[in-house]
Amino acid sequence: MDVSHKQFTLNMTCTFGGVTVHSDADVLKLGEFEFHKYFTKTVTRIEREATKAKVGFEWIKGEAKLSTDGVAKNRWLHPQVEDEAGWEKVESMIKGWMTSSKKITNINVALVLSYKKTILGTDGEDVEDEPAVKGRQACSHEC
């Protein structure tokens, strides 16, 4: 089945220390999203935020949540996305839904890239993880 004309919605979020520092959305066709380009943009944003806060940063994870009308919430997909291969896996899953014999509409992907803050030593290098704030945990998922 030709899916070249079909589209999906991509919601992108980048978190730093549990706070969203960038979010965006787009309607795309398979093969249009460039994960590496987006990842590079997020690192630039995180570097800027870390510099302003005078902290370091460390990658936590990248995760996508694929949802759609016609598929029960407990059957939504949650692949890890940490590189181009991870994104290719997401697109493969999207294509599977697009070519399914079931009537599946409104395919949505929520892509979250998460980073944590680290403490910098006097030499500017990361020395340890950010201490936990009492009564609050860092949010590393879609908030």
Image (spheres, grey):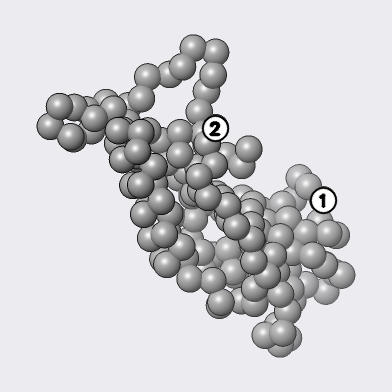
Q: Which mark is residue 72?
A: 1
Q: Image quadrant of residue 51?
A: top left
Binning the other alpha carbons within 10 Å of mark 1 as few (below 14), some (14 to 19) or many (20 upward) gives few
Measuring 50% from the left and 28% from the top, which residue is drawn there? Answer: 138
Helix or strand or loop: what does disc 1 sit on? loop
As drawn, the residue found furthest toward the left would be: 123
Helix or strand or loop: what does disc 2 sit on? loop
| Residue 55 in the image: above or below residue 28 | above
List the residue tagged with mark 2.
139
Number of callouts: 2
Q: Is residue 127 left or right of residue 4?
A: left
The three-letter code of the residue at mark 2 reads: Cys
Can residue 63 be seen here? no
Percent across and percent down for residue 22 are 53, 50
Q: Quadrant of the C terminus?
A: top right
Can residue 41 be seen here? yes
Q: Is residue 59 left or right of residue 77?
A: left
| Residue 106 in the image: above or below residue 23 | below
As drawn, the residue found furthest toward the top would be: 134
